[in-house]
Amino acid sequence: MNKRKSFAGKNILCGIVAFILYSNIQAQEVLTLNLEKALEIALSESPTIKVANKEIEKKIYAKKETIAGLFPTIDASGGYTYTIKKQRFAMMGQSIEIGQSNNWNAGLNLSLPIYAPTLYKSMELTAKDIELASESARSSNLNLVNEVTKAYYQLLLAQDSYEVFQKSYVQSEANFEVVNNKFKQGAVSEYDKIRAEVQARNLKPSVISSENAVNLTKLQLKVLIGLDANQNIAIEGNLADYENNMYVEVLNADTANMANNSDLKQMKLQGDMLNKQLQLNQSAYLPTIALSSQFSYISMNDNFKFKDYSWNPYSTVGITLSVPIYEGGIRSYKKKQTQLQIEQLNLNTLNLRRNVDVMVKNYMNNMHKSVEQLSSNKESVKQAEKGCVIAKKRYEVGKGTILELNVSELALTQSKLAYNQAIFDYLSAKADLEKVLGKDRIAISTQK
């Protein structure tokens, strides 16, 4: 008996915990998103953007490391040498032993570059490297914006499609109720009743499928912008809200300026870096001048009585001139390699520019086509709605058939879906065009 009470108590406790958890999930705040807010969250939470910014920071430190080469370097040194066999030399018929067993030295060494052409060119090269890292980060920004924007539009399309199927299903059920009542009254045949019921049942899978599509696209959007998968979100508006802007945007689209295309800009920066690298290779033929100085103390003794040691200062200062003469042709080969890389990059840039031009024209053509389709689809929706009203009235007065009614409902559903698809195709092409043209929504600022 006690065991049963204990088991029952545990079940009640588990039920309470489950209810609390379920209530918390249901009470979770719904995050309402528009496109700008979704992009803001994505750009602040995306690991890709954070990695790109870290890369810029790393390049800045690399530049500072190169600049540090202009400053003097100071090293402390110390050493001890024990003489096993002292040196001897002969003088006036006698052999004299020189030196002492213990030799100590300690001091400072200073080195300062006075003229170092390779170092100067390295500084210019690292500065271009920072620019390239910044442009690479901007490219990551553009890619993420494009992905989030298209995912947002995809969710709008999924929601609008679900709404179309849901309304069509509700209407088909209403039609079935009307036909079923008439069948009970003997006003219509059983065939009409069966057709109306089949029509409603055939729409149910489309409703379920479109609802699943909404849930899937929501999950994809949450993953892209960095939200938790359990976070409830709601999207503002629908695709029809973008219709009015389409006609103006497609007429005012500026596709001539491709200077902000990220791939082309990265190619240009790579070319600048190769030119700097070529100058760096050429600077290897120039001499270098460095200032060096040494200050040290030296002591030599035959014992380890440190307090009796006599420390003698020793210091030097001088200038070192280094002139490269011959290294087996290494510098010449490096120069030729860099020149070939520049030629390769010029060819790749030409090919990339042609591809970008083709993509821009393709996206513009898709936008124009979508606008033309939208006008036609919008008129189709109006005509299909009018056809549905006529078919319903004809059926109610006994002049139409259930087949006409079903066909009119199907035509209305298809025309609404085509209308939404045209807007989505336009917005998707526009997002791709903005990416190719390098239009920034949020600029990346970098302290150099």
Image (cartoon, rainbow, N blue to C red):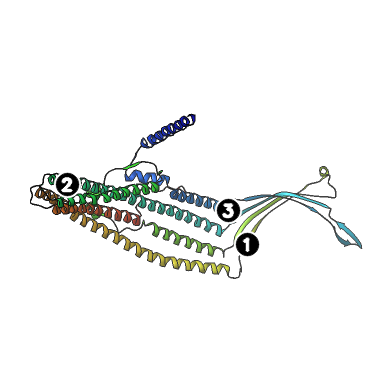
- Residue at 57% in and 63% down: 286
Point out which mark residue 27 bears.
Answer: none
Residue at mark 1? 322
Residue at mark 3? 69
Residue 245 visible somewhere in the drawing: no
Are dots 2 and 1 in contact, CB under 8 Å?
A: no
Residue at mark 2? 175
Please indicate whether residue 438 sits to the left or right of residue 286 in the image: left
Q: Amino acid at mark 2?
A: Asn
Q: Amino acid at mark 1?
A: Ser
In the depicted structure, whether residue 93 falls above or below residue 193: below
Secondary element at tag 1? strand
Residue with the most extreme bottom position: 328
Please indicate whether residue 446 sits to the left or right of residue 364 in the image: right
Residue 270 visible somewhere in the drawing: yes
Mark 2 / mark 3, whichever is N-terminal? 3
- Where is residue 347 drawn, in percent x and y? 41, 67
Task: Tell me if mark 3 has few (under 14), some (14-19) or many (20+) residues whose alpha carbon lies within 10 angstroms of its own.
Answer: some
In the depicted structure, whether residue 233 falls above or below residue 414: above
Please indicate whether residue 293 sits to the left or right of residue 9 in the image: right
Task: Tell me if mark 1 has few (under 14), some (14-19) or many (20+) residues whose alpha carbon lies within 10 angstroms of its own.
Answer: few
Q: Nearer the viewer, residue 394 or 411?
A: 394
Mark 3 / mark 1, whichever is N-terminal? 3
Q: Nearer the viewer, residue 252 or 168?
A: 168
